[in-house]
Amino acid sequence: MRTRPLKVALLGCGVVGSEVARIMTTHADDLAARIGAPVELAGVAVRRPDRVREGVPAELVTTDATALVKRGDIDVVVEVIGGIEPARTLITTAFEHGASVVSANKALLAQDGAALHAAAEEHGRDLYYEAAVAGAIPLIRPLRESLAGDKVNRVLGIVNGTTNFILDKMDSTGAGYQEALDEATALGYAEADPTADVEGFDAAAKAAILAGIAFHTRVRLDDVYREGMTEVTAADFASAKEMGCTIKLLAICERARDGASVTARVHPAMIPLSHPLASVRGAYNAVFVESEAAGQLMFYGPGAGGSPTASAVLGDLVAVCRNRLSGTTGPGESAYAALPVSPMGDVVTRYHISLDVADKPGVLAQVATVFAEHGVSIDTVRQQGKDGEASLVVVTHRASDAALSGTVEALRKLDTVRGVASIMRVEGE
Ligand SMILES: NC(=O)c1ccc[n+]([C@@H]2O[C@H](COP(=O)([O-])OP(=O)(O)OC[C@H]3O[C@@H](n4cnc5c(N)ncnc54)[C@H](OP(=O)(O)O)[C@@H]3O)[C@@H](O)[C@H]2O)c1
């Protein structure tokens, strides 16, 4: 074993960074044996230097992250600050000064992954980011390496623990959205400002990363259709139950049936209770991958938290250090397929539509005609009447999102349709 240590700069020592530092220290001997050389924490960049950080020697702490990555003797930079800047500039500077990079930063990778990969390649360095999607769950490496010989057709995932906790609460207790969110906040599963989670921004960043890797195609954050889950109601769950379904916020990356394009989207969807993703409870994450040769694969586990996320960061650190010792780099960006990313209107799926209608003869026929005129075929219709008003629940066969939008627009114009109470896609069948 080499005795000269590999030097690691840790940028950020918060929820994830503090656990990375702890594991690097407590597992130092095992890590050295697995890598073939000791790893040394050479510096820790933070914003507030006076905070007590257990297990981190005070002399390693600095507020000058730029100087740390420019030192020239750093082998690996671990970026766990988060956000776009200064993380982006620090990572680029790290490559320019000879370091490889491990990051957990989904927001940055979804936005600037291509440029960062290009910078890594230009300088002959590694960029690894297993922790950026679904925390501890091995997903990037299985997609990038284990399935490199297969053809992935679909990735369907619960990639945000906060929203899964809220939806699971609504499902199991009948609570409304706000009540379930309040509980998630009280238990520390939701942040004081939950927008990034509940509006689907966090999941959309992960969908962009997953789609890019799965389909060997650059998928930008702007390419991902996004709908949050704040409008999901207890009534939606009641309807889902009647259909033998539950509701999950899903990230869905799909290759079109003709193979000529891909789509990436995030939105709440009904899935059958028999689907493996339906049984993912609480704040857990799971990703269901469908590929041509392997068939169906399910990756499941804790998608966040300091220690689980640090596990993924450390796995990358070991891989990058091994590459460093053998003078090589691991797989970089694979975007050779360059498939077009289709807009949401081209997505084909099934829909569950709840309408408030006048309870009088001929309404059902009128509604059915609108569906037919837009080429959306109806699978089932359920009607419940009360005091001259009625609710109509229509479940369709597969249709394009554009056709469904046209249908809904036309339905809203009917005098007999008082309102469209909810529209939900039905997935996983
Ligand atoms: N938390 C999770 O469960 C989780 C899961 C998966 C991925 N991630 C990703 O991991 C990354 C880190 O998340 P986190 O939860 O650990 O965040 P965090 O607890 O807020 O920690 C951020 C750290 O960055 C430091 N920092 C902020 N601005 C800085 C600057 N300009 N220069 C130097 N240091 C700076 C902070 O310093 P101070 O300590 O002085 O404030 C803090 O130590 C993010 O990209 C996140 O998306 C997190």
Image (cartoon, rainbow, N blue to C red):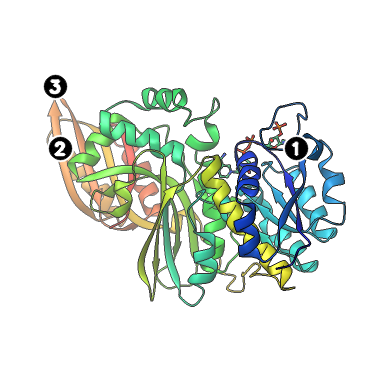
The circle drawn on residue 383 is 2
- Badge 3 is on which residue? 387
Residue in the picture at 52% in, 48% down: 135
Neighbour class for label 3 at 10 Å: few (<14), some, many (≥20)?
A: few
Where's ligand 1: which quadrant? top right
**How far, Cα to Cα, is label 3 from label 2?**
13 Å
Q: Describe the element under mark 3 as helix, strand or loop.
A: loop
Residue 91, compared with residue 47, is above or below; it is below
Which badge, 1 or 3, is on the more N-terminal residue? 1
As drawn, is 196 to the left or to the right of 79?
left
Image quadrant in which you'd find residue 249: top left
Neighbour class for label 2 at 10 Å: few (<14), some, many (≥20)?
A: some
Image location of residue 177, percent across then percent down: 37, 27
Residue type pointed to by label 1: Pro
- Badge 1 is on which residue? 57
The C terminus appears in which quarter of the rendering?
A: bottom left
Q: Are marks 1 and 3 in contact (CB under 8 Å)?
A: no
**How far, Cα to Cα, is label 1 from label 2?**
68 Å
Residue in the picture at 70% in, 40% down: 12
Residue type pointed to by label 3: Asp
Image location of residue 240, percent across then percent down: 24, 41
Residue type pointed to by label 2: Gln
